[in-house]
Amino acid sequence: MSYGPIHNPPVPFSTHFHSGICDGTLVVINGTVLPSGDRFAVNFQCGSSGKDDIAFHLNPRFDGGVVVCNTKEHQNWGKEENKHELPFHRGQAFEIRILVTSHDYKVSVNRNHFLEYHHRIPIHRVNTLEINGCITLACIDIQSQGGFFPPQPFGAAFGAAQMHNPNQFPSAQFQAPNYVIPYQTNIYGGLFPSKVIVIRGTVSGHPKRFHVNLKFSGGTALHFNPRFDECTIVRNSFLNNSWGKEERQMPSCGMCFASGQSFVLEIICEPHHFKVNVNGNHVCNFNHRVPNLQHIDTLQIEGDVVLQHVQVYCHKKSQLDHCYRQHSFYCRTCSSCSAHSCRSRLRAGRDFIVTVIKNPGFSASPEPSLPSTEQEIDTTVLHLTIMSYGPIHNPPVPFSTYFQSGICDGTLVVINGTVLPSGDRFAVNFQCGTSENDDIAFHLNPRFDGGVVVCNTKEHQIWGKQEDKRELPFHRGQPFEIQILVTSNDYKVSVNRNHFLEYYHRIPIHRVNTLEINGCITIACIDIQTQGGFFPPQPFGSAQMQVPNQFPSAPCQAGNYPNQFPSAPCQAGNYPNQFPSAPGQAANYVIPYQTNIYGGLFPSKVIVIRGTVSGHPKRFHVNLNFSGGTALQFNPRFDECTIVRNTLLNNSWGKEERQMPSCGMCFAPGQSFVLEIICEPHHFKVNVNGNHVCNFNHRVPNLQHIDTLQIEGDVVLQHVQV
């Protein structure tokens, strides 16, 4: 379970744990301490009001050089647990990871274990995360039974020795230290088919060996062991206190690790074997020798390697392969039979309408014929994953990652970072390979030395014609958010939630397999989603998402470039409210607001809307639309003191639902709110500030046709997330 990363939320910040928290819930917070800050706090609460209990209060205090932990119950604080060590620094970036276990909260800071806090209130009562104080937030990610927890020294109990080393705290913003070797971490939930482990590192200068172990209580399920002194890669298992038979066959690509060279190692758990890729090349398969994969719960890495990043995530491409083994298909995507001809076009992360031919005797060898009667077929929607690679926090620059399933119409790349104070240029590249000689399909290149953003394509080692945008929405020393949405026609780029440019394809997107980022920036978070997430606000009814005056031609203050995060208020006419003075705080969305819901709706999809009711409101509404009308209109009416729910079908409104929730009118003038619309099998469930408000039974039979979100009226909109 992942709630999806929340980028650049305002502070104070509050969110509801939709399913509560449990053993294995992981909360990752990336932010920056304000230069003049005294304190901030992270609270795991039993409600959203100031009177509710706080199960875990994590409170760094710069005015006392201490981190205070406590619990508040029945409005009384308990006994403080103080740690007189402060791994946070004014003006510096940080990453906090809080892992919930059955016994305690385990806290790490900047990938170093910091403290544990034993439960005083049962975790099943906790339903709210609240963050306040002297910080800005770049990204918050909440995962249950997923992700990875920071490195711990191999063989040490989590809480035994203190793993924090002050010298490991980075002086550069957002730059995380390398992992400690030997390295060990838990794999929460164990392994199962479709789970993937990604390891990014660099081979040491004069290496002999390193190894990656997948372990369980009874031994080692996979020992992957590049041996430079023997020029081979050994695979084995350790069961019943003895090593098994070694596998030493070398891949066709040869010894795929080299002294001093970086690598990306992927271990993919498949039904019958582990599949191992290095730098996108298949190296080997290793048949399972352990019957119960879920018992494999520990990852170890040791030897002559510098470790930069470890990630565990799950994809479900195997669902498609399973369906191919069980059925033959008539594919409506290309109207061809059996999908042998179109299977290569199907990508994990997309939804397809397929016709399953009920033919239990089907085998792969003969080409099946189409059914002659309608009774022989069953039409269904196959939901392949809304593919998310999982957010990558604080990666080093230059950064490179492989698109495991390529990119397609709907792929969304979100990059949160900060421009270095003395930086001249940086670049984001969508590439057709990992080497310098490979083609670059899209090169996005902000240049501070020229006050321009350059876009281009490199093909056969020759750059094409530049497309220049002489407008620079980035500023030295300031944070930014870039969102790049891939469509069938172009790349759509937004900066700090304002549409910025489009770049039409010169190289087909199916050739793109690598994302590369370099230059004068640090990166806080990168998130890659296919057919998911959300794209920034666009004015309702307008194709062009940018409001021209949002990037004023005259700078807000002295300088060469318009300043999106000015330290002093902008002059009149430059929309000061849309360019906040606090770094990292994103602009409010433009109202009326409209955005696409990629892949439509289906049970378990959630829409989260964060905003503030205007000062003297009459009404606002949230519409879930499709081509034939409105599936849900949620319409708080302050002039009638009620909340109306309805649908618009066949150009006419249906029967209104006006029953008020037990909590009453849950919106108030000038008050902030978090509105959740949860798509369930038979109805939409609506929550406001964590309280259930109403259910609205579906009146539209095909939820996947609901593809547009609209918000309009007397409301200030701060954040939308699907």
Image: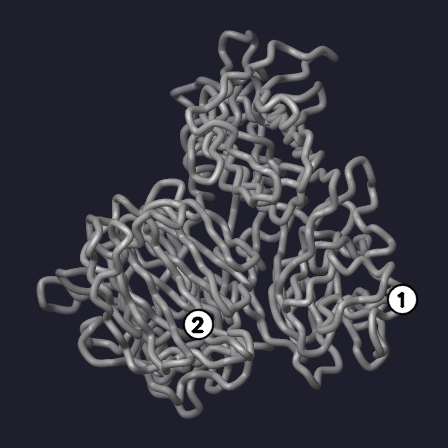
Which labelled disc corresponds to residue 465?
1
Give the residue drawn at x 84%, y 61%. 574
Left of 389 or right of it: where is 52? left
Quadrant including the C terminus = top right
Of residues 241 and 165, which is closer to you in this image?
165
Give the residue drawn at x 63%, y 49%. 718
Residue indicated by mark 2: 39
Of residues 636 and 335, which is closer to you in this image?
636
Tag 2: amino acid = Arg
Q: Nearer the viewer, mark 2 or mark 1?
A: 2
Left of 704 or right of it: where is 18? left
| Image location (x, y in percent) of residue 621 | 65, 30
**Can the viewer see residue 292 in this picture?**
yes
| Image location (x, y in percent) of residue 150 | 35, 69
Q: Label 2: state its secondary structure.
A: loop
The image quarter containing residue 97 is: bottom left
